[in-house]
Amino acid sequence: MSADHLEFRLLKYIVAVADAGSFTAAAQRVHVSQSTLSTQIRALEDVLGVQIFDREHGTKLTSEGKVLLRYAREGLKTRERIVRTVQAIHAGKMMPLRLGFTPFVQKALLNSVSEMYKDLLPECDFVPESGDTDELTNRIHEDSIDTALVTLPIVQDGLDVTVLERERLLVCMRNDDPLAESEAVPPKALNGKISIFAYQRHHPAAYTRLVEMFNGLGITPRPCKPTMNIGHVQWMVKEGVCYSLIRASRPLMNGLATRPIAGVDWTIDTAIVAKVENDNPALSWFIEELAKHFRTAAEMTEKQPIASARIREAAKNKVDDTKENQLALFAGPDADGGVRHLRKLSPYHKEVLDE
C-alpha cells in the first residue's frame, strides 16, 4: 500500500471509527468485519508513518488523525455532492441555477461567480436575477430562486451564509482636508459630517446597523437624501458637503483621498446565501468551491503591498481579528480559517456602504 491508497473507502473507515467510538461498532456501520477494518487502518498508518488513533486510549484521535478526519469528512461530502450532480445531469433533472444578486454586489465578483459556475458545470445554465436584499432572501425561502449574492447583514433565519469577499471601509475626503494629513481619522472629527447614502432604501438592515456602529463611536451621521450613484457621492465629498464611507478598492476622483477611522477596522462583506436544505444537487458543491476559491484569492491579496503609504501601518491588521468592529458581528471563522457563517443568523453582516 502507498500513500496513493488513501482512498474513499479508508476515509469512510476513519469517519466511522471516530463517530462510532470503537472499531467493532464502526465495522458494523460500514459492513465489514472488525479485523478487516482494523487491519486496513493499521496498514494505512504504517504506509503514512503516522498514528491515526491512540489505541492506548480506545479510539482517541491523534493530532495527525484529527487532520485526516477533517479531510475525510470533507472529501466524502464532496464526493456525494458530485455523484448527485452527475446523476441529475444524466437523468435530465438538472435545472438552471436561479442566482439572485443585489445592486451592492460588485461586478467583478458577479463575473467570477458566473465564470466559476460555467467552469464547474459547462453544460448547465444559470439564471441571474437582481433584487433588494430582503426581497431575495424571502424568495429563497419561497423556492423561487436557489441562492443569492448579498451584502450583509441579513435578517432571515434558516439560511446558510458563506462570506466570499470582505473589503475594508475607509472615509472618503478631499485630499487637501486637514484630516488627510493623519494616518487615521479621529471619530469625533466625523460627528455630524459623514453621510450614509446607499442603504436607507435598498438595504435598511445595513443602514440600521451602520447607524448603530457610528453611534457606538459617538458619531451622529449627517442627514442626506439616499443615492446609489457613487459618482454623485464623490462629487459631494469633493465639493466639501460631507464625508462618506467608501470601499478601499473604489477608484477615486482627482482631489479625493481615503483614510481609516481610528480604532476600528470596518468591512463590507459579500456573501452567498441559500437554504440549509435545498433541491438543487449542485448548489452545495458550487458554494463549497466558491468558498475555497475566494479564500485563496483573499490570502493572495493579503500578500500584496498596500498602495497608500499613509495607511500602510493600519492596513497590516487582518480584518478577521477585529470582530467587535466589523459589520458582520455574527460571523465566525470555521475550523480551517475560512469565514463560513452558520445558519440562524438574524441581524447579519453588512456590505457596501455607499456603494
Image (tube, rainbow, N blue to C red):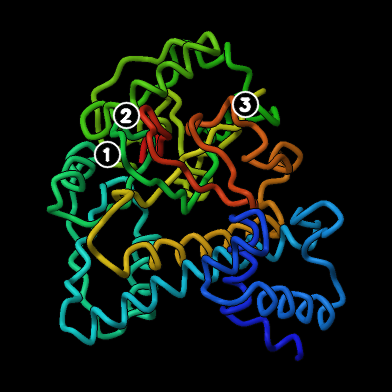
Q: Secondary structure at mark 1?
A: loop
Q: Disc 1 versus disc 2: distance between alpha carbons?
A: 7 Å
Where residue 232 appears, x then y in whole percent? 30, 38
Q: Earlier in the sequence, mark 1 or mark 3?
A: 1
Q: Type of residue at label 3?
A: Val
* Residue under label 3: 264
Front residue of 307/181: it is 307
Q: Which mark is residue 197?
A: 2
Left or right: where 280 falls relative to 339 = left
Q: Earlier in the sequence, mark 2 or mark 3?
A: 2
Front residue of 35/269: it is 35
Q: Quadrant of the N terminus?
A: bottom right
Front residue of 136/83: it is 83
Left or right: where 270 falls relative to 69 = left
Residue 313 higher or lower than 324, as above or below: below
Tell me the residue at 46%/40% (across/down). 268
Mark 3, Cα crowd under 10 Å, few <14 / some 14-19 / many 20+, is: some
Q: Secondary structure at mark 2?
A: loop
Taking the view exactly as shown, the residue that stands out farthest to the bottom is 1
Where residue 292 appears, x then y in whole percent? 53, 64
Q: Which mark is residue 90?
A: none
- Whether residue 198 is visible here, answered yes or no, is no
Asked whether disc 1 touches disc 2, contact meaning CB atoms under 8 Å apart, the reply is yes
Looking at the rendered image, the disc whose residue lies closer to the viewer, 1 or 3, is: 3
Q: Type of residue at label 1?
A: Met
- Whether residue 137 is visible here, answered yes or no, is yes
* Residue under label 1: 228
Q: How many marks do you count on the picture? A: 3
